[in-house]
Amino acid sequence: MPLRGRLRASFDDLGSLTLKNIERPVPGFSVSWVATDWLLSTSGVSAATPASVDLPLMLPDKPSIAVLPFQNMSGDVEQEYFADGMAEDIITGLSRNKSLFVIARNSSFSYKGKSPDIRQVGRDLGVRYVLEGSVRKAGSRIRVTGQLIECESGAHLWADKFDSALEDMFDVQDRVALAVASAIEPSVTQAEIRRSAQKPTQNLQAYDWLLRAVGEQQLFAQEHMDKAIALARRAIELDPQFARAYAYLADWIHRRRLYGWMQDEARETAEGVRFAHQAVRLEPNDPIVLTEAAFGLAHLNLDLATAIPWLDRAIALNPNSAQAYGHGATVRNFARAYETAADHAALADRLSPFDPMIFAFTKARADSHLLRRQLPEAVTWLQRSAQGKSTSRSDLPPPGQRPRPYWTD
């Protein structure tokens, strides 16, 4: 009878064995296992909950940091999106600094609503530092607090608070990003962060609408996508120069096409293509704009000659962007750049190991093997993608509304 315990392996008793240079018999066992059982699986684990792993990820060869979701101290759950937006923009500001390794937003936000042990966070995400913070919004004033913690020792390296008028929110974000960079790597100049800091818009009300839109689209269902698009359109009405709103619209319109939700496919497709180009014309140096616009454009009209250079530029501007690598992996498969697609999918996985979109990154990696007829590798990554989808995308449309292959267009 095989012996079974908590390990996913079988142990068969071989009885007492006589071994060379050992006087008395020694109990012996044979061990067998299935290799795929030892892959990190999301089965039974929420995609938003980090899995516990025994071996920590290897630390990068440069300062590494994860920015955890900021706590909303306003006493109003409706302001949750505001605290999330603050943390996201600090992540974006830090990510543009090529001297830092910054974990992507989706993996950092897997700890939202929890009080994790910082040492475990460091092991789970493979980072040396963690930034925690809170936001209190009262009337026209905001207070942002932040503290930088070294994961291995748990030591607090830096802590500060920032009080500001609401209209100076972007200045507060810059000041937090500058302070963190200075605390973890003295050689990183504040000027580099300051030069790279880009405000998505000067219209705070438009920014507010877009934050709400991003939250809606993450729910994936058609009604939430429709609401997200309506909110993003409202943001553009308030600020017709708001590049990120156009870029997100291009991506979200492609999803309407993908899931069969369009009512006038030709008109909506043309509008999405126009939004993608408009976004990049307005902000050609914003990695988020370039990534979202490229992803939408590649799916809407397969303009790979335009989309791939946009993705390349996004990565050059922000080498920590899991989205640029992950979305780009799919686009590069369209262009038959299969090896690059696999490499970029792997980088996206490393930058955001608990990303709720991880199934899409691994699917792109599987496709890169499948299209090269590397069937065993393709099966392995398809299985991992399916596991991710089963926990994070249970609300996919019914089979009749599932995405159709792009090559049938």
Image (cartoon, rainbow, N blue to C red):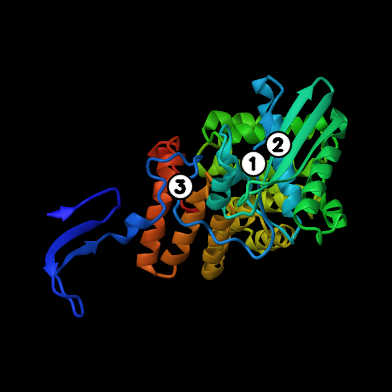
Q: Residues within 10 Å of mark 3 (few under 14, many from 20)?
A: few
Picture coordinates of residue 145, whole percent (x, y):
76, 35
* Comes first in the chain, label 1 or label 2: 1
Q: Which mark is residue 215?
A: none
N-terminal label among 3 and 2: 3
Q: Which residue is under mark 1?
A: 68
Q: Is residue 202 visible?
A: yes
Q: Residue furthest front?
A: 23
Rendered residue at 86%/51% (across/down): 194
Q: Residue at x 36, y 56 (%)?
A: 38
In percent of width and height, residue 51 lies at: 46, 46
Of the numbered discs 3 and 1, the one sitting upstream in the chain is 3
Q: Secondary structure at mark 3?
A: loop
**Dot 1 and dot 2 residues touching (CB under 8 Å):** yes
Query: Which residue is at a point 68% across and 19% down the rendered structure image?
Result: 75
Q: Position of residue 271 (x, y in %)?
A: 68, 43
Which amino acid type is marked by label 3? Ser
Q: Are marks 3 and 1 in contact (CB under 8 Å)?
A: no
Q: Which residue type carries mark 1?
A: Leu
Where residue 376 appears, x then y in whole percent? Answer: 35, 66
Q: Amino acid at mark 2?
A: Gly
Residue 133's tag is 2
Q: Residues within 10 Å of mark 1 (few under 14, many from 20)?
A: many
Label 3 to label 1: alpha-carbon separation: 17 Å
